[in-house]
Image (cartoon, rainbow, N blue to C red):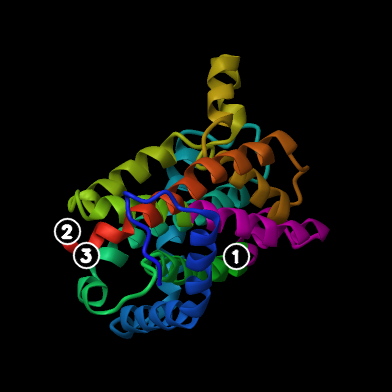
Amino acid sequence: MTTITTSQIPSLSGWRNYLRNLWRWREFSWFLALSNLKARNASTSLGLFWWVLNPLIMAAVYYLVFGLILNGRQGESQFVAWLLSGVFAFNYTATAMTSGANSILANRRLLVNIRFPRLILPISALIETGIGFLFSIIVFYLIAWPADGVIPRVNLIWLPAAVALHSVFNLGLAGWSARLAIPFRDINNLIPHLSRLWLYLSPIIWPLSFLRDRGGLVEDLALLNPIYGILSLYRTALMGREMDLPAVWIAIFWTLVLGAGGILSFVRHEGNMVRHL
């Protein structure tokens, strides 16, 4: 395998070799992800269901506070479905960032003793979190159907595109957190706080109509939120909302900037990881 270090500028052939190596190690990434899932769920009674139950409890709290007490559901008739789609999708992103950092720190011995593309570790972490996220989509309909009358419609054909775009975005963020986990070992203590701040600043627990009385600039800034376009695409697929093309382009832009950027940064620095562990 050709390892790309910070002193190398990856050539087209270098990236081809790297991608070829990633493909060779694809079964290992699945084995690692499924092994971690099995180990994580072995000590709990509910197992994989905790991947859904945690964001579900969080959504219930936000519904109580923002939907009922603060009446934050103004202008959104399907607030339960709106809230669940946002919380489940955002939890996928937040968990991917934490798992990305853990994938490096928890596999020091593996990194030292085995030569393989290091991006396999964030990928395996993403597979692990992605399995829980896909399971949560089923739970979404089990709740949104009786609560808001939301059922699968023809717009569901957009779901694979939403998941694919979201997964590349999340892999990039996992790459950034994994890349920073070595020089900054405390990053896992910061990620939950940064994620919570990002959640509060996103149209997840409140609809965009909540900002319309606060001026057009505030609403425009909310639309530039990196997660907004992805959430909009999910709500088109899951709730049958009209496609918001500007939001889709925003999602693609942030996937290229943060997603692809995080992957490239990780690969360029992976050659120096072992010496700093």
Q: Amino acid at mark 3?
A: Val
Left or right of 221: which side holds 236?
right
Q: Disc 3 or 1, which lies upstream in sequence?
A: 1
User: At x 75% / y 45%, what residue is drawn?
Assistant: 241
Tell me the tag on residue 137.
1
Measuring from the top left, give residue 212's x and y in whole percent: 60, 21
Nearer to the camera, 32 or 197: 32
Q: Which residue is mark 3?
A: 274
Magenta residues, start to end: 141-170
Q: Amino acid at mark 1?
A: Ile
Q: CA distance from mark 3 to mark 1?
A: 38 Å
Q: Disc 2 or 1, which lies upstream in sequence?
A: 1
User: At x 36% / y 38%, what residue is drawn?
Assistant: 197
Q: CA distance from mark 2 to mark 3?
A: 5 Å
Residue 124 within the magenta-colored segment of the rendering = no
Residues packed near mark 1 inside 10 Å, few (<14), some (14 to 19) or many (20 plus):
some
